[in-house]
Amino acid sequence: KHLKKTAENLQNARGVRMSDILMQYGFRIEQEPQEVDAKVLPLPTLSFKSGGAVQLGDGSWNLNGVKFASPADMSSFAVVDFMGDSNHIPPVLSFLENQFKVMDTHGIELPANIDPVAAAEVIKVQCKSGEFDAIRQCVIRAIDNAKQYFIFDRAGHFRKNNVWFKTKAVNSETGEIAPCLVIPPNEQSDDLSIMLPQENHMPTHQVTWNGGTPTKARLRVKVVTGSDIKEVVDPFDFRFYKGKYEAQITPGVWQAAKFFGFMYLHPSGRDEDHIHPEQRQCHITPMISKSVSDIECPSVVFAYLPNDDASTYHILKMVSKFDCGVQSQCVVATTFAKQRNPDQYCSNIALKLNTKLFSICKRSRAWNTAFDSKNGIPWVAETPTLVIGIHLSHGLGTDTTTCVAATGCLDDGCMQMAQELKVQPKSDIVGSLLMQEITKSLCHQFRLHNGNRMPERVLVYREGVADNNFGPIVDTEIRAIRQGLFDVVSSRVDDFECPNQSLCQKKGCVFCTPTITFVVCQSNNVPRVVPSERPTTKSKNVPSGTCVDKLIMPFQNGMQLSTSEGKISREKPEGTNMQLFELSDGGFDFLLVAHGGLKGTSKPIFYRTILNENFVWRKNEDSTPLTKEMLQQCTYCMAFQYGTASKAIRHVPVLEYSKRLSNMAMGYVGYLLGRKGTSNSYIGLAEREPDDNNGEHEAPETGPDHYINSDMKDRRIESGLKTVLLPAFSPYSISEDGTVVYRPPFRPHLSA
């Protein structure tokens, strides 16, 4: 429309036709759209725990009645009710009852040994104000109520029924996380103790009788099953489920049982050495003590909202993540009340919860994915590969901040995620220090998730880069990613040396760090792809998986930027086992419509590859080159891995999650900076650090390029760690004295 209006103005004012001007530059106006050849990429195969392969209809499928492939666990929860009593809206307990029923249908593990609806009635907190301080206090109080109910057993439920609160605990020394049972403390004491699974820690108690030598023993539960058969089971194989006792005599099979008492298993294994408290007078002391901060509770905070007000939503998300380090799930009461099929609404929420409650102990995923009879995402599943998505959200108008969000895939199915959030002064380029810290954090998350194994390849998707920023991206972001990878690799080996020292100079290179592919995803592009023949879909769009990689991108492909000699060395230094792929580069750019269009004309994503080392070099024999065709198929299969919707989405999920997180953070960055709602600031601009000459030289003219966590400001730690804004979701445990321990967070996914 703009071009047409300009042409009309020129012709009316000066008698000049636009077509005459364009012809001087070799252009002409066509009245018909350009006809190109496209291809429809093959679909992946999705499957749930119940049933076979899922029927995919134009990139979407149904969740009704299915059991998730690997369900999550929700060991505890908190509730904030913003609705109160209403004649027209179902109360929060009605919603939770329906939600828990649907979650159970999908196989999600609900809190053990309690009735979750009865627990919700006890712990819920009413919030009647939308002000920052009121919401903050309600969320904190709701979380404290959950801790008092589940951990400290203030209602006496666990103690009365001879059961325990099942959750997770972290070993503060090693950083390992394991399932645990919390032993209810005495009413006069707040001292907490836990029991770990037998494979993690055999003894649970120290038992002394008749003034003898203390003996380490493991607690066992004596039960009576059908036909009055007496059995002895581990505490982890005993539960109080829906008002009745059950025991797991055969692994994986729960059966009705009656509680008969406790005994303590002596390490010798001899029956005569086992300790029965009812037969001997004993002094029994739990062996493993824990602080509240080492025990996960609650797993999630439910917020029952009256409407979709953005301000309340952002405050809730900020308080739950920054103040409390806990996942949250918002539910709009009026939306739930309008549902003709409430189970479908609750099923969608269950899908989100299954994704955000992923943990290293319970590696949840809603469905399994395979392609060409091989599990996982093509190319990614061949060898340890870290897929990263980066998105930036900018403040509007005079707001001078940019929120940088990054998401990393921790599994070869690209469905289990970890995330990082940073804040910097407004810029289209991620600052070098922040990009290094993002890379290191996600590498550590990947390593902790994959048995201490580092990624051998890195595939980066970057959203929102214009053509004129390709140079700064290469000079700043890719260089920072390389430096971050080098820092992680070199820190794990004493006296680390790169086989290409003369060129590497401790900045990282292709021979000492994982190989990098960097793809720019341009969503705001001009081309539209429509079918030339009568479409088969209701929306009259091209089908999901339509890919165009010829004719309209010959210039970019001809430049062959991503594998040029100037970017990737092809000379193999001594001391490296890497192999060179002998392939000719025909370019890597393509347009992809991964989603099934519903309304309007489907808008493709333009994928521009500006670095592709994985096409040139390989680390091991299992690696295949990342050709244009393989990148297309890999990208398309990832579109089906968005764990909050039962359909293929337009972006790759690592970008969609990053977009959600950065936009969410942009909504509450004003609170973080102390500009509204609170006088305290959670983050602040980093101060300029003195130079190496005791600050005698003048400081550079450029100011700080990042924000730091206010709580970390005065700690004696490296400057990069001060940018950790959400410690509860990071792979670091940073103590007051600056000691850093690597450990997986309870729940690393922030934006499902």
Image (cartoon, rainbow, N blue to C red):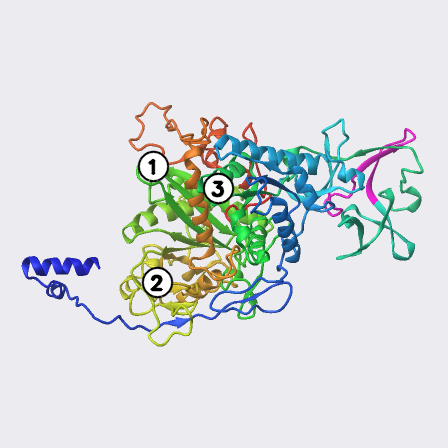
Q: For the residue marked with disc 2, what is the amino acid? A: Asp
Q: Residue furthest front?
A: 87
- The residue positioned 20% from the left and 70% from the top of the image is 30
Could you tell which of marks 2 and 1 lies nearer the N-terminus? Answer: 1
Q: Residue furthest bottom?
A: 533
**Magenta stretch contains residue 210:** yes
Q: Which quadrant of the figure has residue 84? A: top right
Please name which of the two marks, 2 or 1, marks the residue nearer to the observer.
1
Within 10 Å of the Cα at label 3, are there few (<14), some (14-19), or many (20+) other Cα atoms? many
Q: For the residue marked with disc 1, what is the amino acid? A: Asp
Proximity of marks 3 and 1: CB atoms separated by less than 8 Å: no
Number of the label disc, if any, that sits on residue 108: none
Q: In the image, is residue 72 above or below residue 216?
A: below
Within 10 Å of the Cα at label 2, are there few (<14), some (14-19), or many (20+) other Cα atoms? many
Q: Which element type, helix, strand or loop, lies under badge 2?
A: loop
Q: For the residue marked with disc 3, what is the amino acid? A: Tyr
- The reply to whether residue 498 is in sight is no
Image coords of residue 230 (percent x, y): 90, 52
What is the span of residues highlighted in magenta in the rendered image? 196-220
**Magenta stretch contains residue 476:** no
Could you tell which of marks 3 and 2 lies nearer the N-terminus? Answer: 3
- Circle 2 residue: 589
Please name which of the two marks, 3 or 2, marks the residue nearer to the observer.
3
- Circle 1 residue: 399
- Circle 3 residue: 313
Image coords of residue 1 (percent x, y): 22, 59
Please name which of the two marks, 3 or 1, marks the residue nearer to the observer.
3
Q: Which element type, helix, strand or loop, lies under badge 1?
A: loop
- Marks 2 and 1, how far apart at CA: 34 Å
State the residue in front, 159 or 378.
159
- The residue positioned 50% from the left and 28% from the top of the image is 715
